[in-house]
Image: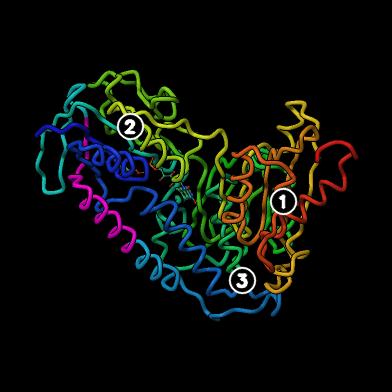
Amino acid sequence: MHFDLIVIGSGPAGRRGAVQAAKLGKDVLVVDKGRRVGGVSVHTGTIPSKTLRETVLNLSGWRERGFYGRSYRVKKEISASDLLNRLHITLNHEVEVLEHQFARNRVTTLTGAARFLDPHRVEVATASGERLTISADRFLLAVGTCPHRPDHIPFDGRRVLDSDQILEMDRLPRRLAVVGAGVIGVEYATIFSALDVPVTLIEPRPAMLEFIDQELVEDLVHQLRDRGTTLRFGSKVTAIDTPADGPCIVRLENGRVVQADMVLYAAGRTGATASLELEACGIEADARSRLTVDPRTFQTSQKHIYAAGDVIGFPSLASTSMEQGRLAACHAFGVAAHEAPRFFPYGIYSVPEISTIGLTEAEVRQQGIPYECGIARFRETSRGQIMGLNAGMMKLIFALDGSRLLGCHIVGEGATELVHIGQAVINLNGTLDYFIQNTFNYPTLAEAYKVAALDAWNRMPRGSGR
Ligand SMILES: Cc1cc2nc3c(=O)[nH]c(=O)nc-3n(C[C@H](O)[C@H](O)[C@H](O)COP(=O)(O)OP(=O)(O)OC[C@H]3O[C@@H](n4cnc5c(N)ncnc54)[C@H](O)[C@@H]3O)c2cc1C
């Protein structure tokens, strides 16, 4: 069998790359070792964690607590099966959509693990035990990442779990310890805390989410502490004991211990390149098993082998992975593609959610740009009042010279949707005037843009900006 393009991995990067190549009239094969197409994004990452979050917010009545108090719940007893039922319905639907997309675009799919035999041939070990040798002119490696599982952590899938295993939990924890205050750790810690599970968040570094504007992180930390989440920062986990007759004991380097009946270990991910046998095609992975590519073309050191998605590292988002896969396929088949805009949004689906685009205040300062910030609290908008929001804020950063929008940072309800207004203004080089001169729907949370812009304008020295 021979194809124009073999894509290894059917997550966002592989899927978009495959469909793009098929739309260019190419013969495309997608190989994935998972039981069904979709990758980490559909089966263990983006979609499951967001479905779980939505289910928790709905069943717990979280969004109504501003009016009815902290003890308000839509469903009194929430079990693990309540959470997982909805998950399975959503995932099945997502897989069907993907299978249909592949079929519609005449992309061939094959279930099996691929490994290189030489730079133009792979062997695919299928579930039925067959070993197929398949060749192609070009390859797209979109194999993603797997949870980092250090040897000293006693993963057992029941009491000590990684972020894949948490989706198979058979009961909700009474007390949860989350190791790793990166995006995944923070998302799960806050989701469980919204279910009133006492959570301890452990992070070896002294701070969390350092790439996010720190004023938002302070707001998040304040909200987490307010609802009883314990933060143990600045000390590594040295061991986790799992005695049969008591809770798990997480031991920290500084001598402190954290007790919990479930531990979620979410401290990093590594590239899933080990099984590809890359030496056969002449590519090397780095120390974290990731691949290096030309950031413009997505070519590896072998020009006919492309890589995209989480396996090439930052920013490791489903959204950016899709675009990388598409750009890689365009380059592979000689189609000119636009250059990606400099700024893309980052969404963290914690409770409350965070979304951000552009420069943080620290970055603006570092670059020596004279600036002013404007802040809006969601409770200052009529929609916020109607929704009973007592938290949530938007921070806009404008350059003093010309009043261009440099950064848009939001924490609170709807942040991941609201951010796209800021994205449009930033990427179209818009200024503070956009927010002042345009009429917005009323009542909406988007009005916060106007409030924040006016706040910044009020602080700006007269004669600058507008
Ligand atoms: C818990 C969690 C939450 C997340 N939340 C978000 C979010 O809210 N928003 C967001 O944008 N991103 C989120 N992400 C990140 C997002 O899931 C990834 O960016 C995205 O899945 C990366 O896509 P990918 O195409 O690189 O491959 P992946 O989705 O990682 O898929 C890789 C596929 O390759 C297959 N594969 C690997 N090796 C082989 C082989 N040798 N042969 C055949 N097949 C192979 C695997 O089976 C897998 O199906 C989250 C991730 C996690 C873990």
Query: Within the image, what quadrant is residue 327 found in?
Result: top left
Q: Residue at x 69, y 59 (%)?
A: 439
Question: Is the Cβ of the residue at disc 3 closer than 8 Å to that at disc 2?
Answer: no
Numbered disc total: 3
On the image, numbered disc 1 is attached to which residue?
A: 435
- Which mark is nearer the camera, 3 or 2? 2
**As drawn, is 14 to the left or to the right of 193?**
left
- Residue 27: x and y in percent read 17, 37
Question: Is residue 26 shown to the viewer in this render?
Answer: yes
**As drawn, is 166 to the left or to the right of 423?**
left
On the image, numbered disc 2 is attached to which residue?
A: 330
**As drawn, is 190 to the left or to the right of 285?**
right
450 to 80, vertically: above or below? above
Neighbours of disc 2 within 10 Å: few (<14), some (14-19), many (20+) = some
- Residue 377: x and y in percent read 76, 59
For residue 62, the mark is: 3
Instruction: Pick the quarter of the image with the C terminus.
Output: top right
Q: Kindly identify the amino acid type of the residue bearing the numbered disc 3.
A: Trp
Q: Kindly identify the amino acid type of the residue bearing the numbered disc 1.
A: Phe
| Element carrying mark 2 | helix
Q: Read off the magenta span.
A: 92-115
Query: Within the image, what quadrant is residue 89 found in?
Result: bottom left
| Element carrying mark 3 | helix
Give the distance between the C-alpha atoms of the residues marked 1 and 3, in whole angstroms: 31 Å
Instruction: Pick the quarter of the image with the N terminus.
Output: top left
Query: Within the image, what quadrant is residue 349 found in?
Result: bottom right
For residue 3, the mark is: none
Neighbours of disc 1 within 10 Å: few (<14), some (14-19), many (20+) = many
| Element carrying mark 1 | helix
